[in-house]
């Protein structure tokens, strides 16, 4: 995080964490009883994919708030494929 605009990056991190938590919890919105909740890796994976897409959109649309070009989509291999980390974990968990 750079000294200029560093607060924006901290807010982006907080937004990412809160969005991931919200998306993970919303996976269970249609469950009628808490006893019917069965957390599994698929919900974690999907929440990660949705969060990754949200961050890429945020960086593209609000790029002026984030002057550090290294964290913009397309400038880093990890940013070019936001699904890479969740996909890697899913394949590792599946044994592929």
Image (cartoon, rainbow, N blue to C red):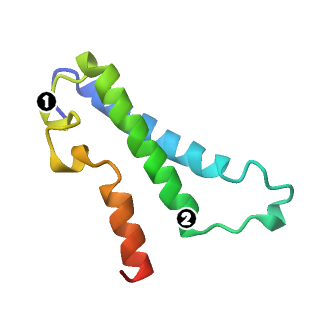
| Image position, residue 9 (x, y; %) | 29, 31
| Image position, residue 48 (x, y; %) | 45, 52
Residue positioned 45% across, 43% down in the render? 51
Q: Is residue 43 left or right of residue 16?
A: right
Residue positioned 65% across, 51% down in the render? 27
Q: Is residue 65 left or right of residue 91?
A: left
Residue positioned 70% across, 69% down in the render? 38
Looking at the rendered image, the quarter that the N terminus falls into is top left
| Image position, residue 47 (x, y; %) | 52, 51
Residue positioned 51% across, 54% down in the render? 46
> Which sits in the foreground, 61 or 25?
61
Q: Secondary structure at mark 2?
A: helix
| Image position, residue 86 (x, y; %) | 38, 59
> Which sits in the foreground, 33 or 86?
86
How many discs mark residues in the rendered view? 2
- Does residue 39 lie above or below 80 as drawn? below
Q: Is residue 75 left or right of residue 28?
A: left
Sequence-wise, which precedes: disc 1 or disc 2? Answer: 2
Q: Which residue is mark 2?
A: 42
> Which sits in the foreground, 18 or 37?
37
* Numbered label attached to residue 69: 1
Mark 1 → mark 2, Cα distance in angstroms: 32 Å
Outermost residue, right direction?
Answer: 32
Whether residues under marks 1 and 2 lie with C-beta atoms below 8 angstroms apart, the answer is no
User: Badge 1, how many Cα within 10 Å: few under 14, some, many 20+?
Assistant: few
Q: Secondary structure at mark 1?
A: helix
Q: Is residue 83 left or right of residue 46?
A: left
């Amino acid at each position: 995080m750079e000294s200029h605009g560093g607060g924006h990056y901290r807010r982006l991190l907080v937004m990412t964490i809160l969005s991931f938590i919200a998306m993970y919890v919303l996976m269970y919105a249609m469950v009628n009883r808490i006893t019917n909740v069965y957390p599994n890796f698929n919900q974690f994976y999907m929440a990660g994919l949705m969060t990754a897409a949200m961050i890429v959109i945020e960086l593209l649309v609000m790029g002026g708030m984030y002057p550090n070009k290294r964290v913009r989509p397309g400038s880093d291999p990890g940013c070019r494929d936001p699904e890479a980390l969740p996909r890697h974990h899913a394949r590792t968990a599946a044994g592929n």
